[in-house]
Amino acid sequence: MIDNAIFENLQAKIDEETAVRDELHEIVQTLSKKGAILNLYHLDLCASWLRQGRNLRAQLTYMIAHRKIHTSYPLPSSLHAIGPIEIIAQRDEVARLKTVADKHPFYKYNGVWTRELQNLVTSIELCAWLGGLEEFKGTGSSSFLTIEEVGKFLNVPVNLKEQDAFHLTIEEYLLALIGMVEELSRLAVNSVTLGDYNRPVQIGKFIKDLFAGFQLLNLKNDILRKRSDGIKYSVKKVEDVVYDLSLRNLIPKGSAAA
């Protein structure tokens, strides 16, 4: 006869793992909600208000009052301060996540948070590209943050090889950069609608340089390799926008070839 204690012990282990996952999911859900509060489109909207001479602080107050964005932090007085408000709130959640995750095997549970961590790093990189987080930028990456600089901002280790602890992996960082490229290609189109004809040129040059960097990598991860290959479509999308602007004489001659 089989001893029932064997299965009772297995059930106890299952219950223990479920409790860990539930705790991690709760933190990740909070991280996700805060990440959805203030995205690139809100930044674009605020930028358009600034160009129209509207009061940024008043408009942010309106957005908070109408539940378009939520924040317990003081309202910013400049555009570059908008992004870090919610990013800092997310960083606080990452600290909570790290505290719990460090108690358990990293690769057993990292699938719970990896997508939201990628999204957060994408937001950090977009904020940096738009002119924020200057104090975390090194001399060699003025337009974006290196993986080490992102780790410093989030106060988490990166690319751990021997220690089994919470960290930002190279794959997560690279996927976040790809997400940044995709968002910037959308921003290039939106900028034209807002009458900002120089920004698509700036975006085009930046993502071309970033794509060239990705082509130097020998990627073994199938998902990462497929996603990085898709950067060329974002580059083509922005090139088409810039080319159309040049045909309409809305940007200086030669900008389309930059």
Image (cartoon, helix red, strand yellow):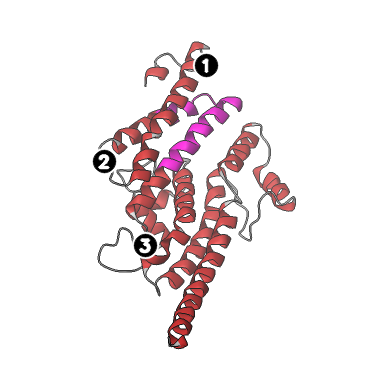
Q: In the figure, 223 relative to 160: above or below? A: above
**Which residue was labeled with disc 1?**
250
**Which residue was labeled with disc 3?**
167
**Which residue was labeled with disc 2?**
217
Looking at the image, can residue 107 be seen?
A: yes
Q: Earlier in the sequence, mark 2 or mark 3?
A: 3
Secondary structure beneath label 1 = loop
In the rendering, at what x and y percent does residue 204 appear?
A: 42, 28
Question: Residue drawn 70% across and 52% down?
Answer: 64
How much space separates mark 2 and mark 1, taking CA atoms?
A: 36 Å
Magenta residues, dominant SS class: helix
Q: Which stretch appears magenta?
A: 178-204
Secondary structure beneath label 3 = loop
Q: Earlier in the sequence, mark 3 or mark 1?
A: 3
Q: Quadrant of the N terminus?
A: bottom left
Q: Is residue 23 highlighted in magenta? A: no
